[in-house]
Image: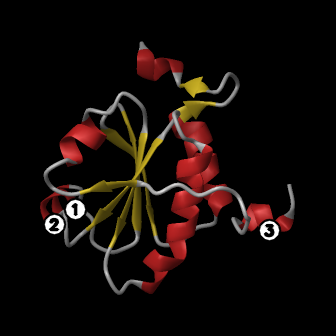
Amino acid sequence: MGILNWLGITGDCEKDPVALDDNNFKKEVRQSKIPVIVDVWSNGCAPCMQLAPTIKRLACKYEGKVKVAQLNVGAGPKSAAKLGVRGTPTTLFFKNGNVVERVVGVRGQHYFEEVIETELIDVADGSEDKEATA
């Protein structure tokens, strides 16, 4: 793996994340059959815009294994408040409808991949963690 990949600067594919709001949050996140990453962002937030390409690359890389979604605090103020989000960007990792990891601020793609592969999915066989399906 090259330094650019490690930093999360690659030309990999990108996919738009699922757009969340207060109306669909429960269905898309809490009731999801697969793990979910939620990028909570706000308008005018420069670090949020910096993180956006990484989120799109994660959505592409883990398609079918992990749902990647974005919640704009303007569209989902109740959901953001219930999650205790105090600043953006905040990235939340959900497994079985519960938060298992929280990251505030911008991190490189490699960091998010490490969390996904240790907390959300079993990379040995590429499937969701066996505990989550038991």
Element type where label 2 sits in the image: helix
Q: On the image, numbered disc 3 is attached to which residue?
A: 4
* Tag 1 near tag 2, CB within 8 Å: yes
| Alpha carbon distance from label 1 to label 3 | 32 Å
Q: Amino acid at mark 2?
A: Pro
Q: Secondary structure at mark 1?
A: helix
On screen, residue 113 above or below 54: above
Q: Nearer the viewer, residue 38 or 12?
A: 12
Residue at the image position 58 percent from the left and 24 percent from the top: 127
Residue under label 2, please give it: 77
Q: Is residue 5 left or right of residue 80?
A: right
Q: Which residue is mark 1?
A: 80
Rate crowding at label 2 as few (under 14), some (14 to 19) or many (20 or more) other CA atoms within 10 Å.
some
Which mark is first along the chain, 3 or 1?
Answer: 3
Task: Find residue 124 and report its image quarter.
Answer: top right
Q: Quadrant of the C terminus?
A: top left
